[in-house]
Image (spheres, coloured by chain):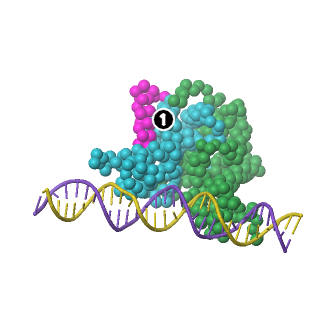
Chain colours: A cyan, B green, C purple, D yellow
Amino acid sequence: MALDKEEMSERVIAIAEDLIEAGGAENLKARTIATQAGIAVGSIYNLFRDIDDLHRAVNMRLLGRLGEAGAAAMAEMEKAGVTDTRQRLLALARAYAGFVAAHPASWPALLAFNRRQLPHAEPDAYEARLSALLQIIARVLADGRFGLDETRLRIAARTLWSSVHGIVTSGYAPNSAGRQADETWEQVELLVAVFIKGLERGGTFDHAETAPS
Amino acid sequence: MALDKEEMSERVIAIAEDLIEAGGAENLKARTIATQAGIAVGSIYNLFRDIDDLHRAVNMRLLGRLGEAGAAAMAEMEKAGVTDTRQRLLALARAYAGFVAAHPASWPALLAFNRRQLPHAEPDAYEARLSALLQIIARVLADGRFGLDETRLRIAARTLWSSVHGIVTSGYAPNSAGRQADETWEQVELLVAVFIKGLERGGTFDHAETAPS
DNA sequence: TGCATTTGTGAACAACGTTCATAACCGGAG
DNA sequence: CTCCGGTTATGAACGTTGTTCACAAATGCA
């Protein structure tokens, strides 16, 4: 046969990626995969434990590409000699926004998938790739010289990331159609601008008289 | 029979809510509902078009309660005579965070559900309830006197909401277990503080030399 | 009471993920 | 070349899912 086991796995992952991108996670059906890959249904289970395992493989590939996009954006900034914190953060945000826009179905599928897996809580290679992204942000913030110690730097990076994430995936989208992308970007610009100004002004975050319930 | 059609609908919705809360959206099975409600499987389809319709009804109830929580938080602030913008925004954020914490499974289910429905795009009564919340935020920002015109006020409100949303649902949670809630709240405090400081400083958002790809 | 309409019922259907007995295949030993 | 132990491929079969539909029961009105 022309195809190794490894090759067939990657081919199946590629097919799965297309299926998810075409119709969300619920479009990832064993029989469709088998037909498109030219194999039997049962053979899928020789390559992956179950369909969730295949979805996880697809998500790994997605996260890898997201990491590449972030690193590429930073490399481009460095090559161009851009040291301005605002522009660097906006470049990272633009990388993320572009990535989400390029994967309008598989990225939400990844988010939904991750939410389901909280109970079993394996160490997860997910987190490694994710915290790499957070460290990129933290490094940019450190270069901004806002006088943040390591702990607050980590918190600030997480805050910024989660905020951009919330804006880009845009929660609910009560929007008609086209100008959605524009307004999303306006929000990102506002967030980054306000974040930097806020960090510049107050030395750090000081008094915190309100507590969570 | 003791139960009206309306009453039975609400009872089914209540059962559905419990099922979703117990095991996510995928735990909402027709036969389980039928058994717990003491009716036949087919009868469910006399009350709701399909299971998605039932899930939508559950989500409506959820959104209603979220709106109530937000309004209650504002009313409490008003009764206490609190006019400080920071404290009012934190009260709203705390209401949202508390709501999410109180519905750890059904709220993610709502988010995932909404993402699936983008293609058919009905006018949706969702949006009405949502923009009510946004207007609460906008009103608080307006009282803060940052010199924002109506358009920028709307954008700022959406930015703030989406950011808090991103933080609270916390994207991915590479966290072990307990102090997660604490760190989430630290992030919310940082965001709100930095947001206000940023708005106070720069009159509005001015130059925007970077554009989306 | 009798009839028209609505509501309730559960067996039946298609589609799904997953399993498993069986067949095909493969690489070296004799 | 021939066999044979072990890996891989196969698709029929199983249990569960959402949904439908012919039929039974109930209900309301004249």
Compared to B33, does A105 lie above or below?
above
Residue B15 located left or right of residue A1: right
Residue A178 colored in magenta in the image: no
Q: Where is residue A35 in the image (x, y as percent from the top left)?
A: 42, 50
Task: Please give the name of the residue rendered at 49% of the width and 32% of the height, measured from the top-left corner.
Answer: A91
Bounds of the magenta span? A61-86
Q: Position of residue A72 (x, y in %)?
A: 41, 33
Tell me if I can see residue A196 in this picture. yes
User: At 38% across and 49% down in the image, what residue appears?
Assistant: A38
Q: Is mark 1 on a helix, strand or loop?
A: helix
- Report whether residue A151 is seen: no
- In front of the other: B169 or C16: C16
The residue to which callout 1 is attached is A95
- Please report, as a chain letter, where disc 1 is located: A
The quadrant in which residue B47 appears is bottom right
Which image quarter: residue B34?
bottom right
**Label 1 amino acid?**
Ala
Look at the image and say whether residue A72 sits in the magenta stretch: yes
